[in-house]
Amino acid sequence: MRIGVLAVQGAFAEHLSTLGAIGVEGVAVRVPADLEGLSGLILPGGESTAQRRLVDRWGLREPILDLARSGAPLYGTCAGMILLSREILDGDEPVFPLLDVGIRRNAFGRQLDSFETELDVPMLGHQPVHAVFIRAPAVERTGPDVDVLARLEDGRVVAVRQRNVIATAFHPELAGETRFHRLVATMAAEHDDPGEGSGRRHHPTRRTGLAR
Ligand code: GLN
């Protein structure tokens, strides 16, 4: 099983090494051919405006949407979360409108540019997540199909899931936290080989739409 990391800009190297740390082969994705045969994709933090431009320059938008539509897991951190949101309240048009959320790009203002905190993420177990926020977004609206995975103490939503798409406003990969990556790997394995009785239909082919 191989999991891609969008590598056009930003903190992709940290995600590749986190995948390596849990024994999963990570693939740097820069052009559509890199997506071939992947079981999942991670969208790193960085600068979402630059990332959106490069995604379109390299023709990655449609093949990434096709991968998501096939049911493969996608996981976005920070700028990656922005790219996955259907509505960017203080920004441009959506890029991959896969999460039915409204997001604020610069939710924490200048005073609170960066901060770290311990977050409860019940889905990952009892031990809190050490969460690093860097010019982070926050979710201000969630649609009915969106699960909230974590909130700050003030109630702001900072981690969400909608079926095969997960996003966190913070960077677990900068804190040695591997549980989100393990979850993505588990979902990717399940996508590759849906178990008996899982209620999910087997996909006969896993094309990413690259042939078009
Ligand atoms: N605020 C940045 C943006 O809008 C995201 C910052 C990050 O990914 N650490 O793209």
Image (tube, rainbow, N blue to C red):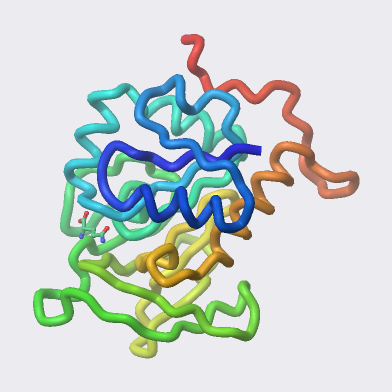
- Of the four image quadrants, the one with ligand 1 is bottom left
Q: Quadrant of residue 135?
A: bottom left
Q: Residue at x 48, y 52 (%)?
A: 75
Q: Nearer the viewer, residue 18 or 6?
A: 18
Q: Where 144 sits versus 75, above or below?
A: below
Q: Quadrant of residue 60?
A: top left
Left/right of residue 86 with respect to residue 198 in the rendered view: left
Q: Position of residue 144 (x, y in %)?
A: 52, 62
Count of numbered circles in the view? 0
Q: Where 166 sits versus 126, above or below?
A: above
Left/right of residue 119 with respect to residue 135 in the rendered view: right
Query: Which residue appears farthest toward the bottom when viewing the image?
Result: 153
Left/right of residue 144 with respect to residue 111 in the rendered view: right
Q: Position of residue 138 (x, y in %)?
A: 31, 69
Q: Where 74 sits versus 183, above or below?
A: above
Placement of the N terminus among the 4 image quadrants:
top right
Q: Is residue 76 visible?
A: yes
Q: Residue at x 69, y 21 (%)?
A: 205
Query: Which residue appears farthest toward the right when viewing the image?
Result: 196
Q: Position of residue 32 (x, y in %)?
A: 41, 22
Q: Residue at x 63, y 85 (%)?
A: 126
Q: Quadrant of residue 14?
A: bottom left
Left/right of residue 92 with respect to residue 83 in the rendered view: left
Q: Position of residue 154 (x, y in %)?
A: 34, 88
Q: Residue at x 54, y 23 (%)?
A: 36
Q: Nearer the viewer, residue 83 or 12?
A: 12
Q: Nearer the viewer, residue 32 or 68?
A: 32
Q: Is residue 85 visible?
A: no
